[in-house]
Amino acid sequence: MSKCIPCSKLRCLSGSMLKLIAVVSMLIDHSALLLGAEIPLLTFPLLGDKITVYYIMRKIGRLAFPIFCFLISEGLVHTRDRSRYILRLFCFAVISELPFNILVSGNLFYAGKQNVFFTLLLGSLLICISERERSEGENAILMAFILAVAVLIKPDYGLSGVILILLIYCFRTRPALQAVTAYPLLSGGFAALAAFIPINLYNHRRGFIKSPALKYAFYIFYPLHILLLAAVKFGLRAL
């Protein structure tokens, strides 16, 4: 009779590996979004429908955001200075805005939507406010204000994305409830729900990202890869 594998053995993914999975799936998603119209798309017959490479790439990309939400909640648990952590998110939100505008509109300036760092920033603020040792009424007003800001500035993944970060944080010790409560808020349905497979394989270890240079490299990757993809897109159009 075969023996069951202990749960601790199954938890084989460090925080660094989760970041890598999220970054790769995001790159695949944005590559499809920016270059899909510029390159020939293969199609696959599936149950009578045509499934394109573009469709598959976008579905893979749905893994990224829930994992980033989880990593933000873990970051807030383990950081020594939450104020500095939130300031870093704000700085990269500002840095990433022009590249993000190119991604979604093709223009440098676009007010209709803001980049995902604003989503992560607002979600982080919700978490911090929820744990303040102040009156419940005061905290509720501040949280309502953050949600109103989310509605006003329209960050990537919207209001549901901001609330998702808080829910993932609240249920961080209860993986099953985490996935169940997150599902109605996920962009991408079951494709996004699959992100909770690697999340639940997390072993609570930092992994290979230990130096400040590597840590910031993952932050910088977001605006940088968008600019590089945009350059490829304009280069293909010029051919």
Image (cartoon, rainbow, N blue to C red):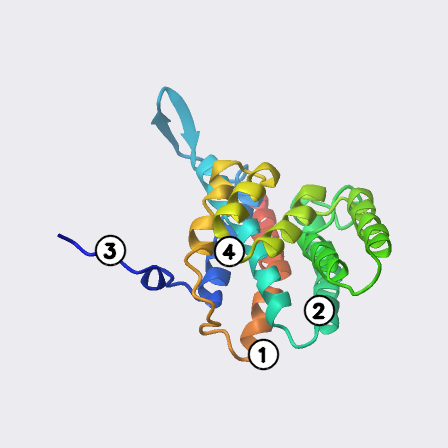
Residue found 61% across the figure and 67% down from its top: 77
Q: Secondary structure at mark 4?
A: helix
The residues tagged by marks 4 and 3 sit, at their Cα atoms, a distance apart of: 29 Å
The residues tagged by marks 1 and 3 sit, at their Cα atoms, a distance apart of: 39 Å
Residue on which the image places disc 2: 88
Q: Counting residues from the N terminus, which is met first, the one under dot 2 or under dot 1?
A: 2
Q: Counting residues from the N terminus, which is met first, the one under dot 4 or under dot 1?
A: 4
Disc sitting over residue 155 in the figure: none
Is residue 62 something one can see in this rendering?
no
Q: Are marks 4 and 3 in contact (CB under 8 Å)?
A: no
Q: Counting residues from the N terminus, which is met first, the one under dot 1 or under dot 3?
A: 3
Residue on which the image places disc 1: 212
Is residue 2 something one can see in this rendering?
yes
Give the residue type that dot 2 points to: Arg
Disc sitting over residue 4 in the figure: 3
In the rendered image, residue 25, in percent from the top left (x then y), is placed at: 48, 51
Disc sitting over residue 22 in the figure: 4
Q: Counting residues from the N terminus, which is met first, the one under dot 4 or under dot 3?
A: 3
Q: Secondary structure at mark 2?
A: helix
Q: Counting residues from the N terminus, which is met first, the one under dot 4 or under dot 2?
A: 4
Left or right placement of residue 197 versus residue 98 in this view: left
